Every structure is written in structure tokens, then in C-alpha cells.
Amino acid sequence: MLAKKNALIYIIAAVCAGAIESVIQFALNAPFVNGYPLPAIPLYFIISAVVFLALILVYSFIFHKVKFLARSENPALAGAVAAITLPFTIYLGTLLLPGPIYGKAIWAIFCIAISPALGYYGGWLLLHPYTRRAAGVIGIIVIVGVVVYKLLPLVSEDGKPTRPNVVLITLDTTRADHLPCYGYDKGDTPNLDKIAEDGYVVPRAACEVPVTAPSHASMLTGLSAHSHGILLNGMYLADDVPTLPEMLSDEGYETAAFLAASSLWARDTGLNRGFEVYDDAMTPLAAYRPTPLVSALTAKVFDKALGFLNPDDRELERTADEVTDSALRWLNKKHKKPYFLWVHYFDPHDDYWPPAEFAPEGLEDREKQMEIISAWLKSDGEEHYNEVNALYDAEITYMDHHIGRLYDELDERGELENTIIVVVGDHGEGMFDHGIPFHGFRLYREDLEIPFIIYDGGIETPEPSCVRYRLMSSTLDVTPTILDLLGIDTPDYMWGRSEFKGFNKRQYIFATCFPEPLREVEYSEGRLDSILDGQEQLIVKNDGSYEYYRPLVTLPPFLSSQEYETYKRKRVNELMPLLLKHLEELPKAESSERTIDEETMKALQDLGYL
């Protein structure tokens, strides 16, 4: 009889806890079930209840076996109370405690230590009728309060923050020369054009490493890949490297990021450092994990289960509409402080499959798109060159449409004139301009040159030096530029510079392409290093051979081929020592490279990186 009574206590407690946890989870992340099957919410509830039941059984065992705990009036009830209160007290602390993660870890250890006492005295209180009723009323109030607070549209307080908001928009695999604001006559990007018209277009900008994770790490740290430690996708940010969100968090900013590709997963890169919200989930469950001991496990099982319910879901990337939806949901919450919002778009990355309504005429069908791209690859770009470029442009147009939704929301909220917007690409794309279809293998200009647009939010700023003097800019300049616009001193250790600091004598950009030990691709030539400016470029290979490029229109007229070869040798002899000196001065910082697990390796392979 007692065993049946205890089993009933366990089941009721697990069901109640699972229901509460599910309500909180979906209140915080609503409506992440959009586009997913109806069973998503009850499925999450069932998984949560089972996880809670397992935790309750563990605690009940402890309460029955440990002498001083077994003295409680009802060890089964006390164990259930301890098991349920533990994750929720941990969650409460993670919400209320500011600062770095180690402070929250200490809080979690403290909660685990006191959980037996909470169970012991909590169980005793629940055995009395008045406290049972009070607990029920308080529980209902808490649940209703969370739902109302999180789901109802809330209006910000009157008055603008003392410092402007910052919105960083990163465009994956977007070539500058495929945007109208950079002179392209075939593209259609009215929203990027609008931001460019109201702001500044950096004339020439390049990334340092033409791969997603290293390039974004440079943007967020102001450091070269050799300094921050992420040389390739799948590598982890060095532990001692400060990030832009950490700096802004210290200045009182809310921080949030919404990512569109698994190559920026927090677990593989560490780029979530300093972000309160880092939504890198390609499935409906966002980066919020309300109860670290329960919800993290529940979420993992839930995501796997959704794969069976919805096998067509793309788990490795999200489209522009999905990322923008998530960012707008966060943006529409109440913000008492200025915020730093990073939104990452991945659509121009291969496979160039734009939605039908944005696709070029006659290429709306997905099978037709796949057929053309396949023939383009097999012919090394000789067939269907124009059609594939049109598909790539259509992906950019689709991305631009959803950037417009974000821009319009800022405008409607009256925040546009108090918001700095920085739009920057992470790298370009080969498109067979030099015999390579994609990126990450070579260092030609189409791989390196990126869009870089700055809207200063109405701040009184001088014209950027890069605009005035036509200097070359870099992804390393993103963090220093944002800090400068906010009136925050740029740390001396940063390699990047602000675009608003007047004339800067940095003439050249240095870039590197690292060989991946896991790559077995015909396009790879091993490590490459390059030095470039607005006109010329030198690319050096591991074997000492090199390639030198300079557009003929920038050379003196009537130069004979022999004179050009003499000029070329002269410039190579001048540029090579500069490149070698740069390589010698590079820091030998150790990255926190983590072992790439099977799931991550498959994700990188499916995205074309391995």
C-alpha cells in the first residue's frame, strides 16, 4: 500500500513539474512551434515529466537511505520536493545573477547542497492543509505571471537609453560586388541600399580568413585568427580573449544573438561568450535552457524526437525568415537597457536554392535549380554560369527582404535614430571566377572582399577615414568601430581600428587560408597567405610559388608585356618582405580547440566545410 502511495506521489509530482517546466519553456521561447507538428508541445511535456520522474526517483532513494533525511514525516514526498525545487532554484539564480558563468556555477553548487534541506522542510510543510493550499495558490500565480509577462506585448519605458542600441547584421557568403550599393547592376537589395544611403559604405573591405567561424570571431574580438584561436570551423575561442558582447555587457547592455548555421554553434566555437541569449538552435527550441539540470536533457531528447515527427526539418541551417522571426520576438520584449543584437544570415551560402517567389523566372522549381547547379559544378562553371549567378543573387534578394523586416521594426518602434547598424559580410564566394566554385580554399578577391556598411544612428560622426581616403578595411575593424561610436575606448591589444579615428596609415590587409586535416577536396592547395590593398594582391603558397594580381586599368598606359613583367618582379620583391614580416610577428596563441564530435563533423560535412 505504501509503495503504491509513493508511486502515486512520484507520478503526480513529475506531471506537475513537467507541466510547469513546459509552460515556462514555451513562454520564454514562444512561438517556436510555428511550422512544426501539433504534438510538439505535449511531446515536450511528456519528455519533461519523464526526466523529472527520474530525478525524483534519485532523490527519493537518497531520502530513504540517508538516516537523518529518512526521519522526515514522508521521505517520498520530501524527495519529490527536493527534486522539483532544485532545477527551479538554479534557474531563478541564472536569471537574477549577473556576471560571468562561474558565478552561476557557484549558485548551482549551492542549490545542490541545500536541496535536501528544501526537500525535508518543504515536505513537512506540504503535509499541513493550509500550506498545501497556499503552495497551490502561489504556484498558479507564478505560472500565470510568467506566461503573462513573457507572452503579452510589452512597451518599453518612456525615454531612450543613454547609449544607442547596436545591431550587427552579418551576411554569410555575400560578395560585395553582387550588391547594388557596390555598383552591381543586376542585384535587387532595396533594404541594404536604404541602410547604405543613410549611412556609410566602406569602399573596400576584406576578411582575414574566408571561413565562417574564424571570420566572425575576428569581427567580435578585433583580433586576427592567430590571436583569437579560431583558425577553422570546429575550433574554439581562446579562453583569455575578451569579446565585444562581454565588453558591452559590462557597460550595461543586454546582449542577444540569432544565428542561422551550425558552423556558429556555441558548443563548437565559444562565440556565445558574453551573450545573455545565444539562439543557435536550428530546431524550434531556442538557446534558452530554463532549468539547467532538467531542460537541457529534455531539450536534447525533444530535438531528436522532432526529427522523427518532422524529417524534412533542416537542422544545420535556418532561412532568413526563421532567423528574423526569432530576432523580432526578442526585440519585441521589454528592454530597460540599451541592447546589442547580432543577427546572422546564411542564405547566400551554397546550395543557392532561393524560395520560388524570389527565384529567377523559369527557375522557381527546386529540382530545376538542383539540376542547373549540378551541371554548373560538373562543367567547372562553363555551363549555366548566368543562371547560377542569378540564383545566388536571388538568395541575396531574399535575405535583403527579411533584413528589411528588421529595419522596419526598428523604425516603427522609434529606435532607428538611436540605433547603430553595422552590416558586414564574413567572406565571399568563388563562383568559378578562378576555377573554384565555393570558398575556404583560395584567397582571391572574390573570396575575401566583403560588404561593410555602417549606419551611425544619428550620432555626430566624421566621415570614416576609409571612405575619405579609400583605404582597405577588414573584419577586424568591426569591434573597434562599434566601441568608438559608443564612446568606449578600444583596448590597445586589438589589431583592428575604428573607421572613425581619422587617417590611419595601415595600407595593407593580410589574409590566410588554412589547410584542414579532415579535408580531402580537389580545390585545396594547403596553406596560403596573402597581402592586398585596394589595387594589387600577392598570394604566396607553401612551396614558395606565388601569384601577383593588379588590374590592368590601374597600370600606366602603353606598358609593354616586358615592362609589365619587370614591374611585377619589382612589386613582388617589395611586397614579399612585408608579408614575411607580418607572418613572423603573428602571435603564437594557443586556441582552445575541442575534439570535433561525430555530430559536429557531420554538420560541417553537410555544409561543405569538410
Image: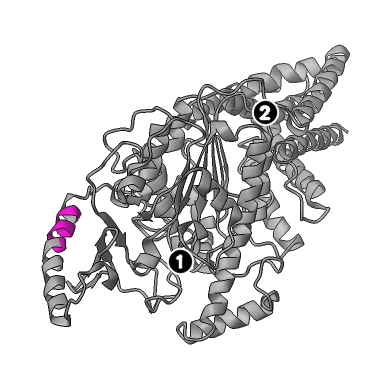
What amino acid is labelled 2 in the image? Lys
Quadrant for the N terminus, please.
top right
What amino acid is labelled 1 in the image? Tyr
Report helix, strand or loop for mark 2. loop
Task: Report how far apart the C-alphas of labels 2 and 1 lie in the structure.
Answer: 39 Å
User: Residue 465's spot in the image, x, y percent?
Assistant: 32, 43
Q: Which residue is mark 2?
A: 334
Q: Examine the structure image and report whether residue 166 is included in the region drawn in magenta.
A: no
* Image quadrant assignment for residue 366: bottom right
Could you tell which of marks 2 and 1 lies nearer the N-terminus? 2
Q: Which residues are magenta?
A: 575-582
Count of marks, rendered view: 2
User: Residue 37's spot in the image, x, y percent?
Assistant: 80, 56
User: Residue 331's spot in the image, x, y percent?
Assistant: 64, 37
**Is 93 or 448 nearer to us in this picture?**
448
Residue at 38% of width from left, 35% of height from top? 462
Task: Determine if residue 247 is in view.
Answer: yes
Residue at 59% of width from left, 64% of height from top? 395
Q: Which residue is mark 1?
A: 609
Q: Is residue 371 above or below residue 290?
A: below
* Image quadrant assignment for residue 561: bottom left
Quadrant for the C terminus, please.
bottom left
Judged left or right of residue 298, residue 244 is left
**Is 134 or 219 nearer to us in this picture?**
219
Report helix, strand or loop for mark 1. loop
